[in-house]
Image (tube, rainbow, N blue to C red):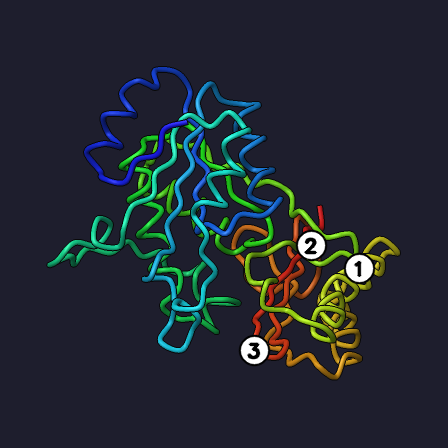
Amino acid sequence: MKTVISLSDLRTARLSLAETVGLVPTMGYLHEGHLSLIRRAKAECEHVVVSIFVNPTQFGANEDLSKYPRDLERDLSLIAPLGVELVWTPTSEIMYPKGYQTWVEVDTVTRPLEGSMRPTHFKGVTTVVAKLFNAIQPHKAYFGQKDAQQAAVIRQMTRDLNFPVDVIVCPTVREADGLAMSSRNKYLEGADRQAATVLFLALNAAKKAYEGGERDAEALRRKMKEVLESEPRVQMQYVSCADYDTLEELDVVKGKALLSMAVMLGKTRLIDNFVLE
């Protein structure tokens, strides 16, 4: 496994990867969710590239960039046994050099849900992913379903800008009690960690209603809200039942839909979702 920092070293190393290349973009502090993406990429591609970069442009002014967990040595030790050929760990100065002024923005699909709570977030996400696609030139790129809106935005960007990349969204990996794995779970302690399972319970309640024949989207949203409101430690930010691709809120569930939510639990912000096929 080769680890490079500079863009020139990345391009030199990339030249030796002549067959199908799979990219797993990460912000580091890896967990089993990230590792499952790498294993999927390894199973489907001859070569796997992992990027590790805590992207400053997707953090808002009052968000946790400075506190975001980082441990590159640990990350590399987790990646090494998985057959990854190349790891790129650029600095902020490499990704956004002095005088940088170019941004990639996706319009409608970025506005609801996370976009309503974090208005500058997706501008940073799409810009950095576009730069990763250009620099690494993967054939396939792997993202987790937990960040469902991010996946929808990146699919839209990839189509609109004609990137020759197959965007693959992989299932959310969960703890034994249902909590979706996230680097931010590190911040959860004691009662907050126990309370965090309420997101999974809320999604399950709506899914059970759907499987029982409920198709009224507001009724499904209400199911999720009722469960979240039963946990006094949770501050609800949004609850959604939306079209899977457009993320427009639904009146009636007829096709593929996304149940999703965001909450604050103490100082930690958590998101989760289920897909209704």
Query: In the drawing, does residue 13 fall left or right of residue 76?
Result: left
Which residue is at 34% across, 38% downward?
88
Q: Are marks 2 and 1 in contact (CB under 8 Å)?
A: yes
Which residue is at 19% across, 55% downward?
102
Q: From what the image shows, is residue 195 above or below residue 28? A: below
Q: From what the image shows, is residue 123 above or below residue 20? A: below
Q: CA distance from mark 3 to mark 1?
A: 25 Å
Residue 56 location (% of width, % of height): 33, 61
Residue receiving disc 2: 274
Residue furthest to the left: 99
Residue 271 location (% of width, % of height): 60, 64
Residue furthest to the top: 18
Which residue is at 37% across, 47% downward?
157
Q: Mark 1 belongs to which amino acid?
A: Asn
Residue receiving disc 1: 204
Q: Nearer the viewer, mark 3 or mark 1?
A: 3
Residue receiving disc 3: 267
Name the N-terminal-most of marks 3 and 2: 3
- Quadrant position of the N terminus in the picture: top left
Residue 194 location (% of width, % of height): 76, 69
Q: Secondary structure at mark 3?
A: loop
Answer few, some or many: residues within 10 Å of disc 3's Cα (few below 14, many 20 plus, some between 14 and 19). Answer: few
